[in-house]
Structures are given as C-alpha cells and as structure tokens.
Amino acid sequence: MAIVEVKVPQLSESVADATLLQWKKRPGEAVAQDEIIIEVETDKVVLEVPAPAAGVMMQIVRENGDTVVADEVIAKIDTTAQAGAASSEAKPAPAATMPAAAPAEPASAKAMPSAAKLMAEQGISAAQIEGSGRDGRITKGDVLAAPAAQPAATMAPARTAVKPALPEVKAAVNISQSLEGRPEQRVPMSRLRARIAQRLLESQQTNAILTTFNEVNMQPVMELRNKYKDKFEKAHGARLGFMSFFVKAAVHALKKYPVVNASVDGNDVVYHGYFDIGIAVGSPRGLVVPVLRDVDQMSLAEIESKIAEYGQKAKEGKLSLEELTGGTFSISNGGVFGSMLSTPIINPPQSAILGVHATKERAVVENGQIVVRPMNYLAMSYDHRIIDGREAVLALVAIKEALEDPARLLLDL
C-alpha cells in the first residue's frame, strides 16, 4: 500500500485559514492525477485542490465546511488500491459507537423556520407532512394545507420552544419559497462575503470618506469607439469597450495629482511611483477587485484583454490571490447594471476610488443652446485625511477633460 497525502495549498500571508467547500470524490472512488477533488474557500478567492497522484480515495480527514490551515492533511489517496475497495480507515464507525437511544430527527431539521414554528404551535410532527420545498423541506404552506392543522388552529399555541436548524452552508436562497406566506431563510455568509463586509465596514470606520461629483460628455469617446471598434478587434483580438478609456483617463489624472494615488500607513503618506488599478467585478460569490498592474505601460488593447480575462475568471471563481492583491486606485462601474449615481466606498489601504455610471442621453447647454448629449455622472470618493478637496476635484476634472478630448491621452496634456 502506498499512501499519498492531500494537503491544503499555501495561502497568502494575509489569509490565516480557509474553509473546505465540497468534496468531489468520496472514499473508494478512483482519482486521476491532477483531477480537482475539492475547492477551498479563503477570504479572497476559491482555490482548486488537485489530486497529487492517481489512485483511490482512501480517507477523507476533514469534511465539507471544516476550517483548515495551509499544509494541513485533508485526505489520503492509496495509489495501489482498486476503485471501490475503500480502506478500513474510510469505513464508517460501527453502530456500537453511536448513542443507544438516538433522538428522532427534529421537525426543524427538514422544515423551514416559519414552518417549524407553526408545527410546534399546532403539535404537528414532520412525519405527518410531506414537504414540497427544496430537498423535501416543509414550507409554511405545507403546514397550513395539512389536515392536522385545521382543528389545531383553534387551540391555544403550545409553549414549547423550538429552535429552527440552519440550512447547509452552501444553501442558496429559494425564491419560490420566499414568496409563500411569510417564511424566512437563514443562510450563513460565505468567507468571501464576510470578508467583503469586514473590509467595507473597516473602510467607513477608518477613512474620512468624502465624495465629489462631475459629469462627462461621452460623445467624443463613443464616436472614436464606433469609428475604430471593428478594426481594433481585428487587429488586437479584443473588443474595444469603454473601461479602457476610463482606466487611461484615471492614470492621466493620477500622474497630475500623485496624492490621489497614495495611501496612509500610520502617520506616513506612501506615494506610489506606479499605477496598479483595481477593477471592481461582480462574481457569483461576491464583489472582487482584481488588479491591473503598471497600467501606464499598457495599451488600450492590453487593458481590454486583461479586463475580459478577469471577468471570465471571476465568473468561474478562478482568480488567484496574486491577481487580487495590492492596487493603488480602484474603479467601480455600476453603470453596467444601470446605476445613475452612487458614492463608492474606498478599498483599503487605497485612498480614492472612481465610480462610473450609466451613460444616458440628457439635455445640456452648450454655447447657449440646449442640445442632447450622452452624459455620464462620475463620482470620486477620497480619504480626506490626506487628499484635500482641491486635489480630488481637480483629479476628477482631469478625468473628465481626458474623456471629452481623448487626444489629451496621446499628447499627455
């Protein structure tokens, strides 16, 4: 017998532990080398753990939902065994080790919280009701429709305290159930969502956040894009979008006003001589901010290709820790979802963030005449501890001017 241990991969310095999501193989099943056998969720990303060798899953040491640390052994693979021949280590514990009189499964274990409460009040057991919800869960509607519920409705409610069980960690909100009566679903935050909440709260508590606004006429950029988008895609193999223009305009402004690209470290202000721009991206697991590094040295095509790559990786949950680490300034584009105006929250330890919104045709005044132009409202939130209103406003004006006259980006004006 040759045993190979499966260990938790190395985590970044800022990540202390991780959570096992779901095993894709069980004891006794064949495993191919480099086959993904489990995903590990950290505060920032989800890591895929491949099998270090081919063989048969011999033992799962740590189960779904367990908290683990780097290099911890979570499973063992027998490289000489045959599929289906699980080792004795993988066999379940004998029945003698179980309590002699195990209590019956509580109603709440297979019922929605509101349904469990109603069942307790009316003295109805889960065995009397057939659940119509996800995985056979009993909904409030099932309880109300049960024959046993009719006579009990006139009785005084029982005083028995029933504590509804929580859904599984990976449970998703069931919309159809949420529309029946007045049910509730309690779903634990994922590690990523909890980390997002912590970071945003930390940002509001530690930064003196102020937001300045301006509007930009997007017609020059739109005309430039419409004129060259087909040639651009043929030449570079990337679609010419608007984000590359916003990124370039932001770098143009940061060069003029370096304090907007700086960060606070204790009583020091750290001025960064490089431009690493974080692009906020929505993913199925929550908001992530992958970083474009040395953007001042990137072309529009390189920026568009990298943003498209990050978007796809975010959708598949394959962003690496390195891709999510660092950044000196961020851009959040709520306009893709239809947002007209917002006040973005700074991504610590950065000191400013640009919010981009939906471009809409609006009536504006030009040379004393009312004309229709495609306008976009820009918002820049900044840390007032180190960035004065003057620098923030002028930086946003510089972004506006660069977008309204793209030639400035080529001439560095």
Image: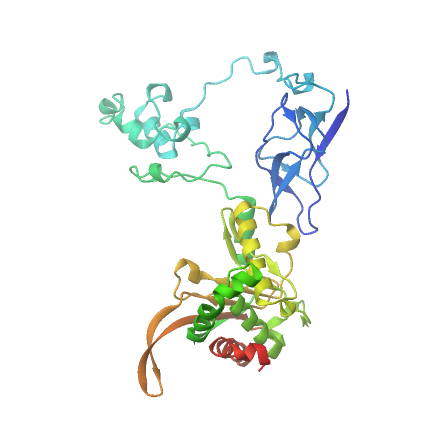
Q: How is the image coloured?
A: rainbow
The residue sitting at 42% across, 27% down in the picture is 110
Instruction: Give residue 92's quadrant in the image.
Output: top right
Q: Position of residue 385 (x, y in %)?
A: 58, 73
The residue sitting at 41% across, 74% down in the picture is 219
Taking 216 as reference, is 167 above or below it? above
Instruction: Give residue 142's quadrant in the image.
Output: top left
Q: How many marks?
A: 0
The residue sitting at 44% across, 68% down in the picture is 226
Position of 57 compared to 235: left or right?
A: right
The residue sitting at 34% across, 22% down in the picture is 130
Taking 226 as reference, is 36 above or below it? above
Is 373 or 122 nearer to us in this picture?
373
User: Is residue 353 something that shows in the picture?
Assistant: no
Q: Which quadrant, please, contains the C terminus?
A: bottom right
Q: Which quadrant, please, contains the N terminus?
A: top right
Extreme residue in the right direction: 2
Q: Position of residue 101 (x, y in %)?
A: 51, 14
